[in-house]
Image (spheres, grey):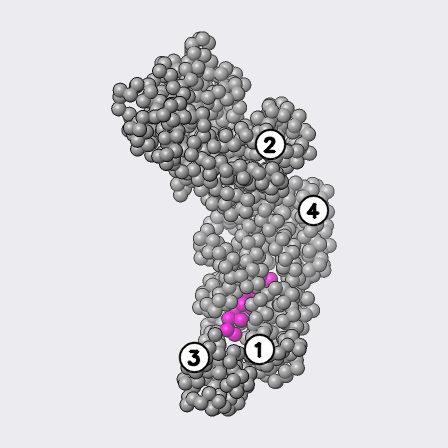
Amino acid sequence: MSLQVVSPVLVGRDSETSRVADAFDRVAGGGLATLLVGGEAGIGKSRLVAEFTDRAGAKATVLSGCCVELGADGLPFAPFVAALRGLATAAGPDVFDRLLPDKAALAPLLPGAARGQAPLGDDARPRLFEGVLALLAGLAAERPVVLVIEDAHWADRSSRDLLEFLVRNQGAVPGSMIVVTHRSEELNRAHPLRPLLAELTRVPWVDRLELGRLGKREVVRLVRHILDREPDPELVSEVFQRSEGNPLFVEAMLDCQNACEGTADLPASLEDLLSSRIDRLPPDAAYVAGLIGLSEVTVCHALLSEVAELDERALSAAVRAAVDANVLVIEGEGYRFRHALIGEAATAGLMPGERRALHARYAEAMRADPGLSAGAPSITELAQHLYRAGDFRSAICAAWQAAGEAQRLLAYAEQVRMLDRVRELWPLVPDPCCELGGVEYATVLEQAVEAASRAGDNVNGERFATMALAEIDRDAQRVRAATLLDQRARLRAQLGQPGALEDHREAIRLVPEDHPARGHLLNSYAARLMEIPRADEARDAAEAALDSACRNGERSAEASALITLAVLDARLGDLEEQLPRLKRAGAIAETLGEHRVRLRAIHAESSLLRAFGRLAEAEAKARHGLAVAQEAGLRRAAGAQHSLDLAGAMIDGGRWDEAMTVLEQALDLSPAPAFREHLLCLKGYIALHRGDAELPERLLARAHEQYGEDVRFNLDPFLVARLETELRLTQGRYGEARTVLERALTHPQLNAAGRLLWPLLVLGSRLADHDPSWRGTELLTRLRRIAAELPVAGPVQHAFSRLFDAHLSGERGDWDAATAAWRELGQPLRLAQACLGAAAAAITTDGDREAATELLREAYGLAGQLGAKPLRDRVADLARRARIQVVPGTPEPLGNGHTRLGLTPRELEILRLVTAGKANREIADELFISAKTASVHVSNILGKLGVANRVEAAATANQLGLFD
């Protein structure tokens, strides 16, 4: 009896189908959507997506690719290569010429004749990612575009990176939809896809769709459609009980029941059911299924014909039987399993010897004709077959070639994996150097260092560098060893490991004075010293780098040295002399086409202009940096730094709404983690000053979860500490603020980080204002000492130092000096804060209500313009306590029910403080009156209320609800 064991109708997914359709409707209307479709194996993810794409295909361009499990990590960019191949087939290979202004950037992913050599270099991978985004945008401009990535749990590192980039930057592609499927049960805590999915769900247009198991009613419908008749209730009950609502399990059980004609007990597990399906195939069909299962990718018919050792008629019959049994499906010119679990079942019964022999046959066929691969990078596939066949001599050659292919694809993580395979096989091959055509073991390790660095795999990069250095005679190969030492130094610095400076020094020692590499090595050392920071040593190294570069004609090294020296000298207060230096460095880099060096010069100039309070110039320079990055194809790779410069200048200038827009746009660019955290902290800073403590609290919790209690970024080691200290001050959690401050002050070389440290010192001085018990403590004494020793370079640092002194002294003269400094700079938040402090000092020191009124009104107006509600409330509170109207012509606020008691507004205010348990001296301090005056007011209040003491007065106020 024949039975079609696949339901012709999708059952039990009405809600999910509706959600997918609604998402596509938004896309068709010019919106965008990303769906992350999860569920256990066999639950119907691919079926749901297939039903959707079949319908959407009439209205949209659909690109689809599947991730491939091949070894520990998938084939590089496999789903994207497959998707673009399908596009070329459907639209013609000229589609890339038509839609891509920079087709060369996309070369690694293009199929067939369209593929070319990708341009290598630091900007190649960003340009590749930009190229894919530009292609989607071009397609979406014509009609909606849908990109489907299946089985993302098998995605290689490069595919995950590109997927994240596309989703985060999808806002630039209206009319686009991305659908990603994955097995939920595969995502254990260590799985690399798990944190990516968690991050992507925070993107506004991303939605997660988790497919659950079918209920009994839905299983009845599924069985009915498969059998094409009303099912027997007992059969349905057994199927539902055993399958637990997994559709693939249901189909497998019905298939087994039909094959056995109901006479045999059903296997206990899904694996056994699927194995029984393979067992029921004719011998040749089961053999072919096992062959295809070993490949783990789609196998083209020509390759299968070479490997199977069956004549064409027998092979066709075997494949036909497997397709008819719903084990295999036809895909293009080849075959794949209907479900990956069936493929696992097909190979489960193979013995180790059989596996090795079959892998050897695959390898033999692919070496005879590399074109037999169905589309995945055939050399990577070949390397896997040779390795599993135990042919290590051939496997090491293939792995070496596969590493080169991965480099061409800009798939650096996969290049590392293949080079590590070469390293693993090296001692297992009699003469590996000869096998690889004279390639040395050290060369393999050097390439692994470079690939790991590009992949951001610092741990492996440092490990490979150490191994390579052990292979090299440093005295005989001085420059080679120096290059490795420099690489290891940078990797160790990023890992926070000791030995980085020692590696830098040894690298410089090895290279002769007249060698062109010396300037680059000295620049690298100077950059690290400036980062620590150790300014004097950094200057010496940068001057040596400049001298070496000029003597050896190394213009790029010359430009880098000029930038470092300009920054170091400007930080001492010498800005005007350094701006021409930076412009000269930028011009050299522009002439050489050294985009990153040019962008570094622009960033340095913008950052320094902001540090000196020249905000309009800093903003203009930052915008110029964004434009240059865009022209160089590095907007998303380097744009975040210039967005930080731009947003920082806007925040200082009080243009917070514009700054928030810049920050959001920069976050959409999927920046590197350090830049991302910095951008988020600036968002948290604005939110905190506008009264939203929830956002900074959430950001800080996330940062501590990822980086630990003491979070420090190279861009600004005090960034997180400043945000957290200010948040805790706002919340009145002074003890926690002190803890954060103490931890931050453990940073080495504090005096060399003045421009970043002064704002933190001011927060510490504010803490002394809020918490009088802190005065006289050792920490406050240390703050004073640090401030006294800290260089003051430029007007901004001068203004911060004035603010620091004013908070600690409380003297009117100090507050007036701080106010004048910030008014000259025109930075509204700091000016408003200074005005508030100056107003309080004017009242308490001299009783100068006229000056205090002007200062409070200025502070209130500035806070209102900024939307800084907490600051405006503090201004209003001081004005109320001092009986000053901050908005001319407005009446003083009055309490409820006080008039019938005969209380004046001042008496009502004092009663509020009495109710709060304040003594006369505390009332006097808060309202800026004498203790004797406070005592007279309290006596009058007791008389008017007809009570004997303060406790009864407080009870009466509470009963009347005067302060509710």
Could you tell me which secondary element the residue under label 2 belongs to? Answer: loop
Given residues 566 and 438, the one toward you in this image is: 566
Residue bearing mark 3: 959
CA gap between label 4 and label 3 equals 66 Å
Q: Nearer the viewer, mark 4 or mark 3?
A: 3
CA gap between label 3 and label 1 equals 21 Å
Q: Earlier in the sequence, mark 4 or mark 1?
A: 4
Could you tell me which secondary element the residue under label 4 belongs to? Answer: helix
Disc 3 residue crowd, few under 14, some 14–19, many 20+, Cα 10 Å: few
Q: Quadrant of residue 832?
A: bottom right
Q: Position of residue 852 (x, y in %)?
A: 63, 79
CA gap between label 2 and label 1 equals 63 Å
Residue bearing mark 4: 627
Residue type at tag 2: Ala
Residue type at tag 4: Ala
Residue type at tag 1: Pro
Disc 2 residue crowd, few under 14, some 14–19, many 20+, Cα 10 Å: many
Q: Nearer the viewer, mark 3 or mark 1?
A: 3
Horizontal side, residue 512 vs residue 727: left or right: right
Q: Residue at x 69, y 61 (%)?
A: 614
Q: Position of residue 734 (x, y in %)?
A: 46, 69
The stretch of residues the image draws in magenta is 753-770
Image disc number at residue 60: 2
Instruction: Give yes or no for contact between labels 3 and 1 (Cβ–Cβ under 8 Å).
Output: no
Residue type at tag 3: Gln
Instruction: Give yes or no for contact between labels 4 and 3 (Cβ–Cβ under 8 Å).
Output: no
